[in-house]
């Protein structure tokens, strides 16, 4: 490989990480990374020490442009839009915890949707990828003062709905394991007891499969929904705990096929919110990764 290819390959995970967090879609992120590569490949020779800044800047600006177009499309999306999930186990060592902040969860990516494209880029580059304001200003083509304002406003917009509870991965896994077993058995009483009274379920069917056009509220109604699936499909329902976007989540299979990926938020004792991805297009990569 030549130097340019080596530099790009070394930075590819970072570019992919920025694009995925910006767009909430693996396919869209990969297109941004590919477009960045094409521009990098065609660019005139430059000093290696400038390569990272150039690549991050180009990938960020491409992601901003792509997000502007996606915002228009998502305004007409059928039902709720949730990001595309990916298999990614929680960090298991202190070093991995430091390397991977709580910045790629389904819940977090959903929150980021409320930010305008440039504000989303500024927030992610500063808060997740630790860019200083001088670099941020150059990447976005704005003054440092304007970038500080973008980040500050983004923090304010996101503050209210950020998770209020810090729950260890071990506690989260234990709670979801109990919930998965109750779901597979169709144990209504256990399902109900594991859900907070004010629990919320939000589903994304993308207009391709049935999904609620509004949040389903309350432990009773959510437990009834999961109970009904087992009543209908019986032993053909299987639920597994899996690493989704750096947290433990649930995969539900019906007749051996992946039917949904569920990101679950918890207060450490009960489940407070479930984000259910049922859109077949957004499950395709996940299903392929599972060997289906």
Image: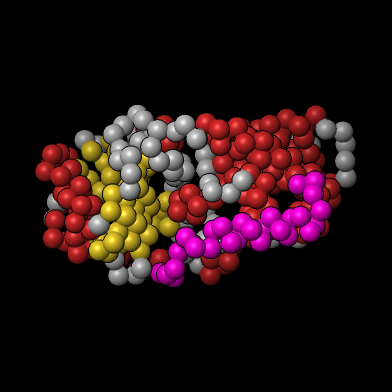
Query: Is 148 a magenta residue?
Result: yes
Q: Can residue 101 be spotted in the picture?
A: yes
Asked whether, in this view, residue 11 is left or right of residue 213, the answer is right
Residue 170 in percent (x, y) is at 37, 68
Residue located 44% across and 43% down the image: 82
Residue located 62% across and 36% down the image: 68
Q: How many marks?
A: 0
User: Which quadrant is home to the N terminus?
Assistant: top right
Residue located 73% across and 60% down the image: 148
Q: Is residue 124 above or below residue 291?
A: below
Residue 97 in percent (x, y) is at 53, 65
Q: Nearer the viewer, residue 272 or 262?
A: 272
Q: Which residues are magenta?
A: 140-168
Q: Quadrant of residue 270?
A: bottom left
Residue 102 in percent (x, y) is at 52, 61
Q: Nearer the viewer, residue 35 or 60?
A: 60
Q: Nearer the viewer, residue 215 or 39?
A: 215
């Amino acid at each position: 490989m030549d130097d340019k290819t080596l530099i790009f390959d070394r930075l590819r995970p970072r570019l992919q990480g920025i694009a995925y967090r910006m767009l909430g879609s693996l396919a869209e992120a990969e297109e941004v990374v590919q477009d960045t590569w094409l521009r990098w490949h065609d660019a005139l020779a430059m000093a290696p020490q400038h390569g990272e800044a150039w690549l991050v800047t180009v990938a960020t600006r491409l992601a901003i442009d792509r997000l502007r177009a996606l915002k228009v499309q998502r305004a007409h999306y059928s039902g709720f839009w949730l990001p595309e999930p990916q298999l990614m186990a929680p960090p298991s060592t202190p070093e991995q915890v430091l390397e991977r902040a709580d910045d790629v969860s389904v819940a977090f990516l959903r929150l980021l949707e409320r930010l305008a494209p440039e504000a989303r880029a500024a927030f992610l580059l500063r808060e997740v990828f630790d860019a200083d304001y001088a670099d941020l200003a150059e990447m976005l083509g704005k003054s440092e003062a304007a970038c500080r304002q973008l980040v500050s406003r983004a923090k304010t917009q996101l503050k209210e709905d950020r998770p209020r509870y810090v729950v260890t991965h071990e506690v989260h896994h234990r709670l979801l394991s109990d919930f998965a077993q109750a779901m597979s058995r169709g144990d209504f009483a256990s399902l109900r007891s594991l859900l907070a009274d004010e629990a919320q379920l939000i589903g994304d069917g993308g207009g391709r499969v049935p999904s609620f056009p509004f949040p389903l509220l309350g432990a009773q109604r959510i437990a009834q929904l999961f109970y009904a699936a087992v009543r209908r499909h019986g032993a053909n329902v299987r639920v597994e705990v899996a690493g989704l976007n750096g947290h433990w989540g649930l995969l539900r299979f019906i007749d051996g096929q992946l039917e949904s990926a569920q990101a679950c938020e918890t207060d450490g004792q009960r489940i407070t919110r479930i984000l259910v991805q049922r859109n077949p297009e957004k499950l395709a990569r996940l299903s392929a990764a599972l060997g289906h």
